[in-house]
Image (tube, helix red, strand yellow):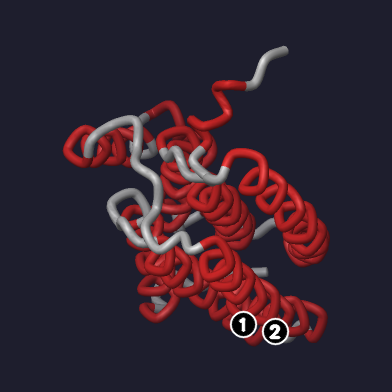
């Protein structure tokens, strides 16, 4: 599986994915966060579509279409239903304020350009910039999970992390990327079912999806 560096469309798509991950840290509405995830997943599906065309792979084309169906359509509908059901218009706050959050995001992005991640970006063979953005998305998504107090934001952070892993696999040219993608999509479907039950039980017990409400729990 190969993606050409001169494909400006693909470069634009990975930038869109990266910006979506960044803006997930500053948006205040859960609906906006769900939209950003939808945009990020749509860009990921298009990247897989381009890869399938270049490789002439029908299985990969199926993966691209399935990715669009699962991540771009099903997951956002799930979040929209969850937001409406529990009247969660605004997302929970973060542990760090916005300026400190953006500084942390910038630092994590800069870290992927350092020698620490050089062995990983070298896998790109001319696509180092794209791999760096994919790695940055991984770190930024992990930080989103840690920094946000709301359960929905943390869920979106997990799914954004999964998108970044798939993007890295594509730009690294891993042969097993299509099989890996199929496995991850299955995991997401199972996760959505589990998440539905978990969030419903959490809201029923604590009347909120703010994870700080769980401090009352005792071992």
Query: Residue at (29%, 31%) from the top-left corner?
Result: 96
Question: In the figure, residue 180 lies in which quadrant?
Answer: bottom right
Query: Residue at (59%, 48%) from the top-left corner?
Result: 158
Q: Quadrant of the C terminus?
A: top right
Give the vertical position of 158 relative to 196 (above or below): above
Where residue 139 sits: x, y (%)? Answer: 46, 39
**Residue, disc 2:** 65
Looking at the rendered image, the disc whose residue lies closer to the viewer, 1 or 2, is 2
Q: Secondary structure at mark 2?
A: helix
Q: Tell me: 13 left or right of 216.
A: left
Q: Quadrant of the N terminus?
A: bottom right
Query: Residue at (47%, 67%) from the top-left corner?
Result: 34
Where residue 89 sits: x, y (%)? Answer: 40, 63
Q: Tell me whether the residue at label 1 lies in contact with that at label 2, contact meaning CB atoms closer than 8 angstroms.
A: yes
Where residue 16 sits: x, y (%)? Answer: 37, 69
Where residue 143 sits: x, y (%)? Answer: 44, 37
Q: Nearer the viewer, residue 205 or 159?
A: 205
**Residue, disc 1:** 49
Alpha carbon of mark 1 to alpha carbon of mark 2: how far? Answer: 8 Å
Mark with earlier residue (1, 2)? 1
Question: In the figure, residue 7 lies in which quadrant?
Answer: bottom left
Q: Nearer the viewer, residue 127 or 64?
A: 64
Question: In the figure, residue 214 lies in which quadrant?
Answer: top right
Q: Residues within 10 Å of mark 1 (few under 14, many from 20)?
A: many
Q: Is residue 121 visible?
A: no
């Amino acid at each position: 599986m190969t993606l050409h560096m001169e494909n400006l469309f693909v470069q634009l798509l990975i930038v869109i994915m990266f910006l979506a991950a960044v803006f997930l840290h500053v948006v205040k509405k859960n609906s906006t966060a769900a939209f950003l995830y939808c945009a990020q997943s749509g860009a990921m599906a298009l990247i897989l579509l381009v890869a399938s065309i270049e490789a002439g792979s029908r299985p990969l084309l199926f993966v691209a279409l399935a990715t669009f169906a699962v991540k771009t359509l099903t997951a956002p509908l799930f979040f929209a239903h969850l937001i409406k059901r529990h009247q969660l218009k605004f997302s929970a706050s973060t542990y760090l304020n916005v300026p400190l959050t953006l500084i942390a995001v910038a630092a994590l992005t800069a870290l992927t350009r350092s020698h620490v991640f050089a062995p990983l970006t070298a896998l790109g063979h001319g696509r180092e910039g794209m791999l760096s953005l994919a790695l940055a998305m991984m770190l930024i998504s992990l930080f989103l999970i840690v920094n946000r107090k709301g359960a929905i934001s943390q869920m979106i952070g997990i799914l954004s992390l999964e998108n970044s892993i798939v993007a890295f696999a594509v730009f690294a040219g891993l042969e097993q990327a299509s099989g890996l993608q199929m496995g991850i999509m299955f995991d997401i479907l199972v996760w959505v079912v589990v998440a539905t039950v978990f969030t419903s039980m959490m809201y029923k017990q604590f009347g909120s999806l703010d994870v700080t409400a769980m401090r009352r729990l005792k071992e």
